[in-house]
Image (cartoon, coloured by chain):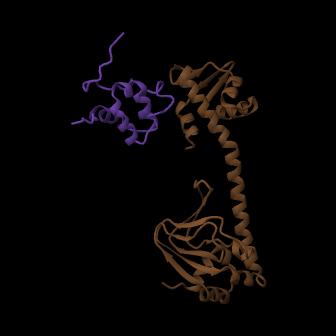
Amino acid sequence: MYILHMDEDIEVQSHWTVDETLRQKPETSRVFVKHRMQCVGCYIQKFCTIKDVAEIYQVNLNEFLKSLNNCEVKKQN
Amino acid sequence: MKINPTDLHQVPVLKEAPLEDLNLLVEKSILRSIEEDSFFFFQGDNAKYAYVLVTGMVKLVQSNPAGQQVNLRTIKEWEMFAALGAIRPDATYPVAAQALEPSSALAIESDLLREMMQTRPYLNFGLMQLMTGYIQEMQNRYRELATEKVERRLALTILRLASQIGIKSGESVELPLSQQDIAEAAGSTIYTVSRTLSEWEKRGLIETGRGRIVMRNPHGLVELADGID
């Protein structure tokens, strides 16, 4: 069993599923929406990896990963 | 802004009209210009005028009593619209006409058009062509509504079931369900399910087997369910 740490150091990997990505880094939902992807709320999140998503929506995988990992958590002050 | 009567030859309904008729139409009609988002007329108004759009773009929208709107048609330059008052003197507009950009249209009195129709076969044929075009389009849309609704519902059902019990194998997702199971889950019949699934199989979306369905292109089904197809 592993404990889920929600810190900013975790890096989204290309083999992660959408489901996993959204659970570990919920703030990435904005990135999917911004790319006009239907992933947030999609029924097949568990089956699609980030690599699949990049292929389906024809975006560059590395740049997509970068934007997923660079998105900042909106801090409440 | 003034309209050159010969410009009206671009209107399909008037393409056979002699110049004197076009002169008469321009002389007797009013050019109305409206801003973006304004209306030429509202649903339920008396159909006193038929319109020819001269510049801009107009959408025809119909609302139900609850206020839900359906966009029925988009009118482009030199199309005639709202001509039903020419045929039925007591008609009211079944739609509202809203400008999508600043627009101007020639408002032709329905009474004038009706009077002209008595002696001008070209005008009758022109309007009949417009009407049969509308009917054909509506028949197609009706068919799409009646059939594609099922397709979307089935796609949604399968996706929902896949999220619960699907098993990933390679690029595909496998569902251990029969067509009967799918029919029951979707509130449909096995005939409809079988017809739709074999159609999808031809398109490479899925593969069917005994008591199982393999989603070959899960994202394709997502698009179907969203109606983006």
For the point 36% across and 38% down, the residue is A30
Residue B218: percent from left, percent from top? 54, 30
In the picture, measured across the screen, residue B203 lies left or right of residue A52, that is right
Q: Is residue A76 visible?
A: yes
Horizontal and vertical percent position of residue B132: 74, 64
Look at chain A in the picture and name its colour.
purple
Report whether residue B205 is seen: no
Q: Which one is in front, B86 or B206?
A: B86
Q: Is residue A47 above or below residue B195?
A: above
Q: Determine which quarter of the picture holds residue B58.
A: bottom right
Viewed as shown, does residue B77 lie left or right of B121? left
Instruction: State the image coordinates of residue B184 (x, y, percent, origin top left).
Output: 69, 26
Residue drawn at the location 63% of the way across and 36% of the way down:
B153
Residue at the image position 44 percent from the left and 30 percent from the top: A52
In percent of the image, x 70 and y 51: which residue is there?
B142
Which image quadrant is residue B136 in?
bottom right
**Picture layout, residue B135 above or below residue A70:** below
Tell me how many marks there are. Answer: 0
Q: Nearer the viewer, residue A66 or B40?
A: B40
Q: Residue furthest front?
A: B66
| Location of residue B10 with respect to A58 vertically, above or below | below
Q: Position of residue B35 (x, y in %)?
A: 46, 72
Which quarter of the rendering shows the C terminus of chain B?
top right
- In the figure, what tint was chain B given? brown
Residue sitting at the far left: A77
In the rendered structure, the answer to whether residue B51 lies left or right of residue B129 reads: left
Rendered view: A23 above or below B227: above
